[in-house]
Image: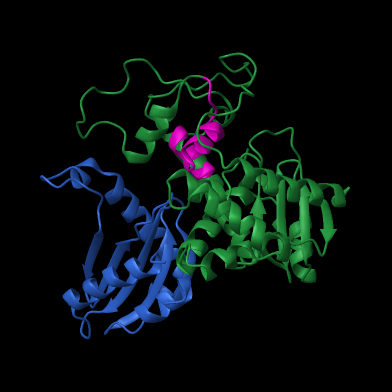
Chain colours: A blue, B green
Amino acid sequence: MTGIDGCLAEAMTIPGARGAGLVDWTSGLTLGAVGEGPDGDHEAAAADAAELARLAFENGAFTRAGRAAGPVEDLVVTARGSYHLIRFVETAFDSSVFLYLWLDRAEANLAVALFRLKDLTARLVLA
Amino acid sequence: MTIAPGTDLASTPLARLAAEGATGALHGHAGALYLADGAVVHAESPVVPDVGRRLTAGGRLSAEAWEEAVAEGGPDYRAGRFLVEHGRLSRGELELCHLSALFDAAYFVLSPPDRSQRAPERFLKEARHWLGPVRPVPVPLLQRELCRRGDLLRRAWPWPEVDTAPVVPVPGAVPSGASGAGPTCGRRAVLEAADGVRTPVQIARALGRSAFATLLDVRRLAAAGLVRTPAPGAPAEGGPRARTPLPGPAPAAAVEVSLLYRIRDALEAL
């Protein structure tokens, strides 16, 4: 893993991956992107995904539910022909970043993709 | 306080330097932007927590580890690479933390909330920053992001007075008990740090947190009626803006070294 570019290159090896990006959800800023963006536009997709991520991350109903309260880890959006996955990156300093992955639903395996995303985001910030 | 809609970004000094593929530092009253081959490689502002403050505030790095990187790597303009090569940080962590600090500082350098401060215009050719390049940002991407940030602030609460005034919580406005109706994580931390004296950027510094994210939280808290919005043009409550140093651990020696670099750059830019 060599930083953001290495992380995104590995994300593209997940079966069914069409595009991936690292996004700051405070503003919707794209820190890096590879492959295709939905509608051919990484920045627009990042802004939409960031809005969704912020709502989920900041909503007490999700973060304080159940016995083991804690931050939201993943978001899964299923759409006709696609999966859109958001995996929050946990850092030991202030940040608000997630890894976004757009998958072709016919080729992807949702469980495998979620497992790989979790591993990728952990290794991105592992010294 | 933000870049006005319709501002011709192509005519700014920054856009001209980008078009020329310039290398050097663009200095202003609110900080500096460093360019390499026309791309932005670093930004710093005294009102925005820098990379060292962000990494040490939450305990990711000890003050000593940061200080060592600045002292050992700084003279060769490679303090960032020093941290990665010595296993103190992963490359990903350095990139995420540095980009966050870069966009945060650039926002305050190019559109300072204090309107008496002008945009930067003094350019020092060939100046480099001691942290070294991490992940260069193209100027058009930076400008699009700063416009988006201005829009987010306006949409959250269109009264910029809350950006520079002390943050004063409205008594009794926060529902008691940790029910779902209260403010969320980031805003809760901002509200808890609001003592009626600190301004949003002073709260950001105390928390080692993004100054822009703190401004946005303060505007959302104001929109929700949880903090006061000062009347436009009225003197801020609490008298003159507090200049007292903030509590909290400061990596003293590292601050001194980084301050020396900054003073040197500023003197050379005169």
Is A108 magenta? The answer is no
- Residue B62 in the image, given as x and y percentages of width and height: 48, 49
State left or right for residue B250 relative to residue B60: right
Q: Is residue B255 above or below residue B174?
A: below
Does residue B51 appear anywhere in the picture?
no
Does residue B164 appear anywhere in the picture?
yes
The count of marks equals 0
Q: Quadrant of the N terminus of chain B?
A: top right
- Residue B25 in the image, given as x and y percentages of width and height: 77, 57
Is B207 magenta? The answer is yes
Looking at the image, which is closer to me, B79 or A29? B79
Q: Residue at x 83, y 56 (%)?
A: B123
Magenta part, dominant SS = helix
- Residue B88 in the image, given as x and y percentages of width and height: 48, 62
**Residue range corresponding to the magenta coloring:** B197-219
Q: Quadrant of residue B194?
A: top left
Q: In which quarter of the image is residue B143?
A: bottom right
Question: Can you name the residue that lies furthest to the right here?
Answer: B270
Looking at the image, which is closer to me, B28 or B116? B28
Q: Is residue B47 above or below residue B14?
A: above
- Residue A115 in the image, given as x and y percentages of width and height: 22, 73
Q: Is residue B156 above or below residue B87?
A: above
Looking at the image, which is closer to me, B251 or A20? B251
State left or right for residue B205 relative to residue A91: right
Q: Which residue is drawn at 57% across and 27% down?
A: B161
Q: In which quarter of the image is residue B41?
A: bottom right
